[in-house]
Amino acid sequence: MSERAYPKAVPSHVYLFATCLVDLFVPAAGLDTVRLLEREQLTVHYPRGQSCCGQPAYSSGNPDEARRVAAAQLDLFAEPWPVIVPSGSCAGMMRHHWPALFADDPVNGPKAREIASRVYELAEFLVNVLHIRFDTLPHDVGSPEERVVLHTSCAARREMGTRGHGVALLDGLPGVTRIEHERESECCGFGGTFSLKHPDISGAMVRDKVASACATGCDRLVSADCGCLLNIGHAAAKQGAPLPVEHLATFLWRRTADATSPLGAAQ
């Protein structure tokens, strides 16, 4: 994973690519992403023609189908604005795999590469472009105190390199204590279609993840990937484990909704 250069000037407009799971299962994560960005005085654009990034087909070994799905998105982000994705796995697909999918396409190849250069995972964008700082907020913002564990999806951690951004955001929040746990770096077992093809292995992996998080005595698990959240949250509920889950965008907004705007460099 190469080091990327970040824009020196803060943009005034951004696109939101909300992802299928946000759209269908966790809409609050998308709405809270918009709230976080608008608080920094950004205008958020949501192209209504967007659908899937193509990752399910791609990770299942169907590049032609993934190419068709991804191609339908390429003309939706025509302005040179950042594309913000509240999911490390979808952001990784768009940034790293869209250019490969269209490498030999003289029309869609340049489009895919240009869009990929503007794709940012949400936490990455908040920290490295907007320079969000929560550690200057009053200590009573977002009370009561909470102890949380962070789950960073495999793609977010290894393709997008965004674990450190999530850590920085959580560690800066007044009243929030982040606890590391033994299996933090391991996959939760979801892996998109992996959980369908290998349910026994997937189930064992998520049981380990839930047990490790619960062993810390945390109040909740926070993640920026809805697939992982749905998997971990449903597994915990089925086991009767005391592990509420929350998307990072929703957690950040809930803890800082009363904070003065803006908090970063977008003023």
Image: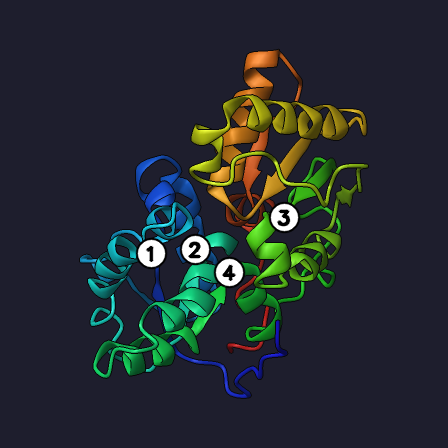
Mark 3 or 1, which is nearer the eye? 1
Q: Which residue is labeled 1 in the image?
A: 53
Mark 1 or 4, which is nearer the eye? 1
Check residue 251 in the rendering and tell me which mark sits there, or answer none. Answer: none
Determine whether, in the image, residue 225 is placed left or right of residue 97: right
Mark 2 near mark 1, Cβ–Cβ under 8 Å? yes
Q: Which of marks 4 and 3 is nearer the N terminus?
A: 4
Q: Which residue is drawn at 67% across and 66% down?
A: 133
Q: Which residue is labeled 2 in the image?
A: 90
The three-letter amino acid code for the residue at tag 4 is Leu
How many residues crowd mark 4 within 10 Å: few (<14), some (14–19), many (20+)?
A: many
What is the secondary structure assignment of the residue under circle 3? loop
Please identify the quadrant where the N terminus is shown: bottom right
Quarter of the figure with residue 66: bottom left
Up/down of 110 relative to 124, above or below? below
Determine whether, in the image, residue 50 is placed left or right of residue 81: left
Mark 2 near mark 3, Cβ–Cβ under 8 Å? no
Q: Which of marks 3 and 1 is nearer the N terminus?
A: 1
Mark 3 near mark 1, Cβ–Cβ under 8 Å? no
How many residues crowd mark 2 within 10 Å: few (<14), some (14–19), many (20+)?
A: many
How many residues crowd mark 3 within 10 Å: few (<14), some (14–19), many (20+)?
A: many
Q: Residue at x 57, y 29 (%)?
A: 232
Q: Which residue is labeled 3 in the image?
A: 152
Q: Which of marks 4 and 2 is nearer the N terminus?
A: 2
Determine whether, in the image, residue 5 is placed left or right of residue 141: left
